[in-house]
Image (tube, rainbow, N blue to C red):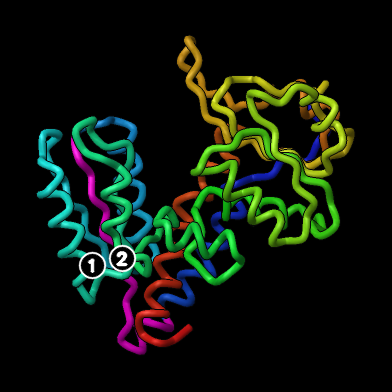
Amino acid sequence: MTTAQIISGKQVSDDIRQNLKTEVEALAAQGCVPGLAVVLVGEDPASQVYVRNKAKACEDLGFYSEVHRLEADTPQEELLALVHKLNEQDNINGILVQLPLPGHIEEKAVINAIAPEKDVDGFHPVNVGNLVIGDDSLLPCTPAGVIELIKHTGLEISGKHAVVIGRSNIVGKPVALLLQRENATVTMCHSRTSNMKELTRQADILVVAVGRANFVDASYIKPGAVVIDVGINRLETGKLAGDVDFESASSVSGPITPVPGGVGPMTITMLMKNTLVAAKRAHGLS
């Protein structure tokens, strides 16, 4: 029986998008329309869905958008040439190359080729480095969305103990850095952590990003803790499940995100926010 408050990523996302739309209209009146270019290599079905959703978000918010679809066997040099061309385009403020890429293309080379000021995924080493030292940077979208969801609960992050399960470069590490930036005390757990439950049961905020369906149940959770489930796993039944066993966890947790409908809707919204920030910087307006 779920008694916990459910954190609706859709609701928080809609609120942020409303503010973005207002800001885009004001910018457009000054002759500045944010532009996003998305590059898709190959036919990966999940990637095609993401790309469609990004194009629709651009349309809804009044952004200029370009989608570049390349064949799966496109040579790496051709993809890099496209990225360099987009780096030079004044009407493009954000460049996103949809991952994963086909095996013959080196992801790192492609990420490094994107101009840091147009890296709206927040993956370029310059942006990652700025995040680590606390300087201004374009933030990775999913971790930035996680912080927004926690803030939306009304919880003061400062002074709280946050535990992050997972240490990936895309979610675990950056979300830990962003929580530190909000003055939380952060513990990171991973596959080699020996006393994981002992640590997670001390957490006021628990962020789970391990890629294992229903990995965390009530026994990991301090009563009343905020639980953010970043995982999205497809079960054999075809249903989606998070890394948190929602039924079990929500019987003891405080505010908790569902899957789907929790962190997912935030990622594209934060991508749009990054593109707007990049556009304002490019026009000297931030």
The amino acid beneath tag 2 is: Ala
Indicate the secondary structure of the residue bearing disc 1: helix
The residue lying at 50 percent from left, 15 percent from top is 235
Q: Tell which of 283 and 125 is nearer to you.
A: 125
The residue lying at 36 percent from left, 87 percent from top is 29
Answer with the quarter of the image where residue 281 lies: bottom left
Instruction: Give the residue pinned by disc 2.
Output: 115
Pinpoint residue 196: horizontal percent, then vertical percent.
77, 26
Can residue 233 be seen from the camera position used here?
A: yes
Q: CA distance from mark 2 to mark 1?
A: 6 Å
**Decide: marks 2, 1 in contact (CB < 8 A)?**
yes
Pinpoint residue 276: horizontal percent, then vertical percent.
42, 71
Q: Is residue 286 left or right of residue 259?
A: left
Give neighbour class at mark 1: few <14, some 14-19, many 20+ (Cα, 10 Å): many
Q: Quadrant of the N terminus?
A: top right
Tell me: residue 272, above or below residue 192. Answer: below
Tell me: residue 180, above or below residue 189. Answer: below
Answer with the quarter of the image where residue 217 lies: top right
Tell how many labels: 2
Kindly give the residue lying farthest to the top in the view shown: 236
Q: Is residue 149 left or right of residue 200?
A: left
Indicate the secondary structure of the residue bearing disc 2: loop
Can residue 257 be seen from the camera position used here?
A: no
Disc assigned to residue 74:
none
Say whether disc 2 or disc 1 marks the residue closer to the N-terminus. 1
Residue 28 within the magenta-colored segment of the rendering? yes
Pinpoint residue 22: horizontal percent, then vertical percent.
48, 75
The amino acid beneath tag 1 is: Asn
Instruction: Give the residue pinned by disc 1.
Output: 87
Tell me: residue 197, above or below residue 264. Answer: above
